[in-house]
Image: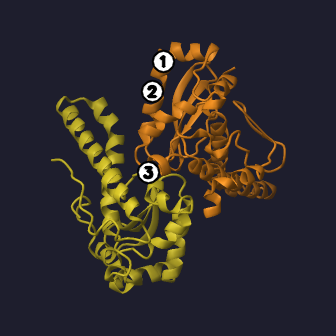
Amino acid sequence: MAALLNNSARVALRSGASATFKAGAAGLTFTRGKATLPDLPYDYGALEPSISGKIMELHHNNHHKTYVNGYNTAVEQLEAALAKGDINAQIALKPAVNFHGGGHLNHSLFWKNLAPKSAGGGEPPSGALAKAIDSTYGGLGEFQSKMNAALAGVQGSGWAWLVRDKLTGRIAIRTYANQDPVVGQWEPLLGIDAWEHAYYLQYQNRKAEYFSAIWDVINWKEVEKRFA
Amino acid sequence: MSHTLPALPYAYDALEPVISKQIMELHHQKHHQAYVNNLNAALSAQASAASADDVPTLIALQQKLRFNGGGHINHSLFWKNLTPPGTPGNDLGGAPALSEAIASRWGSHEAFVKAFGAELLGLQGSGWGWLVSKGGAKGQLEIVTTKDQDPINAPDVPVFGVDMWEHAYYLQYLNNKAGYVEGIWKIIHWAEAEKRYNAGVENLLKL
């Protein structure tokens, strides 16, 4: 564990994650049979001071990896149940697929909708997305306040997302419990992780400070891409 | 009538090495205190809404009451069903009726510990694991998990509970929640559990 938390291990850890990986509003594509942990597009310490390197390392290399492993296990079991025509087992596996698959999707989107300040993190959105936020919320600041209120209102573990309604094209803020993914009528644009493991080592119970600080490392360029 | 934070029945560092002083301080003074404060606020809003016969507001308040009332109840039960390691309360011998019921339900104490641990580790998201006596004192024993701050509802009796929110262990165990689950047995207050199993919990907030 000591080695894991050592910053010098960072590069070695990152080079171990070599999945071919594509994330976007449409979801993820896995070119191998199994899901793999995507590489972070920046160093573990690159989001400091908003999110500490230690949090990022545990969050990516331990938590996200556990979702990847759990998803692969659930899918193996699901394939076996499908092969046997075992409907009961298929239904019983739904929560595991939802939880671990959701955890994998959510974190993969999350890493990409964050960026270090040096790479444009925190720079306000422009173009059509900025217009949509202005017309829906009256401005970026108002949107951030509403998103922070939604995050603060998550009772237990979960996420808050800026989403687009596929039926109307309108944007909205929605919260999801645990690792429930943004699917169906809604497309994920920007997600913020409100699980305690996302902030506790640095902010403890002062989660409002985390919700406030994370805007400095939001990658609006990525959100614009998803919105386009 | 407003609720207050109950004092811990031991010092903040008394559960070490199983649970660190820092975790206990934050958990009790910050997290539990926030549930108490938010419960009081919700109750006061409820009283106003009730006197105004404002039914939509009353309905909207239910979730806040459940979450914060549950958080207050669960933590109050939790502090009392823990005891410093090596103290007489942690001796299973102090729970003769309960340990007999556990052995008859699960085959052995070890089998129960294993089954309970598996339930705790299987929780998806925040929640609690409980040993519950169904239908009242000396009832059928069941392992029950509840999400977020949902409490065990009457007539079922919460014999003891284990907090599986990340704030309960993360500063010490990080993502190794199995390590926390393994350690918790060194601080379960079996004498308190025996009392609840035999006589129930009369008032969840007047423990």
Marks 1 and 3, Cα distance to the nearest angstrom?
Answer: 30 Å
Contact flag, marks 2 and 1 (Cβ < 8 Å): yes
Q: Which residue is mark 3?
A: B148
The yellow-tinted chain is B
The image shows residue B118 at horizontal and vertical percentages of 56, 67
Query: Is label 1 on the same chain as label 3?
Result: no
Specify the quadrant of the image occupied by residue B40. Answer: top left
Marks 2 and 1, Cα distance to the nearest angstrom?
Answer: 8 Å
A131 sits left or right of A207 in the view: right
Res B171 label: none
Secondary-structure class at tag 3 = loop
Query: In the rendered picture, chain A carries what hue?
Result: orange
Determine whether B29 is above or below B83 in the image: above
Determine whether B113 is above or below B206 in the image: below
Q: Nearer the viewer, residue B94 or A38?
A: A38
Q: Which residue is mark 1?
A: A137
Q: In the rendered image, is residue B119 in sight?
A: yes
The residue positioned 62% from the left and 51% from the top of the image is A57
Name the amino acid type tagged 2. Answer: Lys
